[in-house]
Amino acid sequence: MRSDFLLRMVRPTPPPIGVGIAVAVLLVAAETLLVYPLETLANPSSLPMIYLLGVIVVSMVWGLALGLATSLASVLAFDFFFIPPILGLSISNTRDWITLAVFTGVALVTSALADLSRFRAAQAQESDLTAEMAGLLLNTDDVAAVLPAAAQQIAHALDLPGVAIKLEAIPDDGRRSAFPLRDGATSLGTLQVPATTHEMSLRRLRERVIPSLESLLRVARERAAMVDSLRAGREELRLLADQQAALRRVATLVARGVSPTEVFAAVTTEVSQLLDARYTTVLRYEPGCTVTIVSTNQPTLMSLVHSRWPANDGNVAGLVRRTGRAARIAEEDTANPGADSRDGIRAALGLPIVVEDRLWGVVAVSSMRTEPLPPDAEERIQGFTDLAATAVANADKRDELIASRARIVVAADAARRRIERDLHDGAQQRLVSIGLELRAAETAMTLDQVKAQVSDVATGLKGVLENLREISRGIHPAVLAQGGLGPALRSLARRCTVPVELDMHIDRRLPSGVEVAAYYVVSESLTNVVKHAHASRVRIAAKLHGETLQLLIRDNGAGGANPDKGSGLMGLIDRVVALGGQMTITSPADGGTSLSATIPIGHADPSAPPATAGVEGAPSRPAGR
């Protein structure tokens, strides 16, 4: 308690000077009254020391100036009341001057010690204040929430009522003095104190408190920014981990080769969870600017799976179809899968599903919430659209492979039946006829009859041989094996009944599989021209472009060729694709037919017989029968 009393005596901010004067007067009066009873008991020379108590107290609390005034007042009071002449002053009394000197020295020493104690107390108080404010400002994520407590600490330390700290710049309002808190040119806030605050307290604020407060606010702001950055980084990592886990689950389904329906259902579930339970719908584009719902978790659409909806510019499906890119829409007006304003949908986005450069469908995400969809939503679900596209492409490839295998089986059976029919209707019948003629030769009566029969047999055998050659030419043309692709194409051009313009730039033999595929592409195309196109001319271009053989067959016929109608073109497509190539057919009605095929040379069977020496090439020239 004694220590607290002394600390209050030398506190950094002294009480008001008016209070000090009143206290000094009261002390001098009390000391004078105390001297009267002691005058008859104590040594008269020691009585002035009683007044030292007031001098020490006043000097300690209010400083040197008031301490000197108290010393002078004490000497005058003692002289006036206790040194003859009583109730009179004797300025010439040496003892009075000595007493005044002693009192002055005591006042000087006391005020100096008090000032030193006051300075150190102020330092300790300010250090404690800084530490307390640091504990508040540097251990919170919400600086604004602890500012009232920091202001209360300043008010308690400086004994100031009504201290406030604001994070915005506030000017003086007449009732409060405002101290701007700044970090260079950046405003950190404002410290407000009552306008009646003592000048010494204001000086302490400017010199000691405000610099510390500015430093703490700057560090607190930097810490808050760092914490926000770390929190955002952790959240971003969590979202990324969730996204990668979801992608792995969907990718596992794709790798297992499950049906696209299962993949679409997984995409719907995972995307919805990734975007905080928003509705997700997978749509497939159909002819006539419509889409079909293939998977959804939107309650109002779940009963409408496999139904068709319009795809126009009033919904994300229409926008994606028109632009081929991701699209966003807010507050849609048109009912559509994934975004119906009548269901309370406020925003929607769509990402295209592109299968081998073909716009297949769209993944639509819709929200009923007031906050917008995440700005990075497209980036986060892009991988799911890629996996959906892969699932569709894999399913298409499987279907194409199954269909191709079926066509190969059908084509092989048809080829066997054709060879059987040709042998039965041609060579076999001729051989039977020759056998009968030989039987007849056995019964011939004359040499001339025998010669005639043998001559007929020889003629028949020659016909059988020609027939067998025709059959073998259909299986594998001899001219292709002997001369290569150039002579074989020229042979086809000569045998065609429609004039053919052949433009060929091939400077070497190609692998056998490539030559056979190219030969049958041209042969089947010319057969279709003769049978179906009613064309007056055909142009065939064949050239090597790097390690790729490029073929182009174009006619000016009726067009309308459709590989799905059993024209033989589908078999050619299978043959070209089997070699790693591509074949496209463009055949508008009344616009002729254009068939383009590219076959990589390096993809051919390496075990095929090597090309023989020779250069094949021919300038553009008409060829025909």
Image: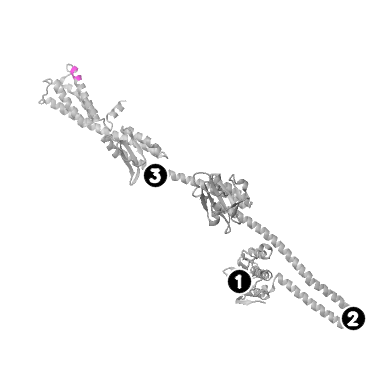
Q: How crowded is the residue under tag 3: few (<14 C-alpha within 10 Å), some, or many (20+)?
A: few
* Segment tinted magenta in the rendering: 33-37
Q: Which residue is mark 1?
A: 542
Does residue 498 appear left or right of residue 345 in this picture?
A: right
Does residue 469 appear left or right of residue 613 in this picture?
A: right
Q: Which residue is mark 3?
A: 222
Query: Residue drawn at (17%, 23%), measured in percent from left and top?
Result: 48
Amino acid under disc 3 = Glu
Query: Residue drawn at (45%, 45%), measured in percent from left and top?
Result: 230
Element assignment for label 3: helix
Which of these two is toward me, 591 or 449?
Answer: 591
Residue 117 lies in the magenta-colored region: no
- Residue 625, position in %: x, y? 67, 77
Q: How crowded is the residue under tag 2: few (<14 C-alpha within 10 Å), some, or many (20+)?
A: few
- Give residue 521's mark: none
Amino acid under disc 1 = Ala
Does residue 604 appear left or right of residue 171 in this picture?
A: right
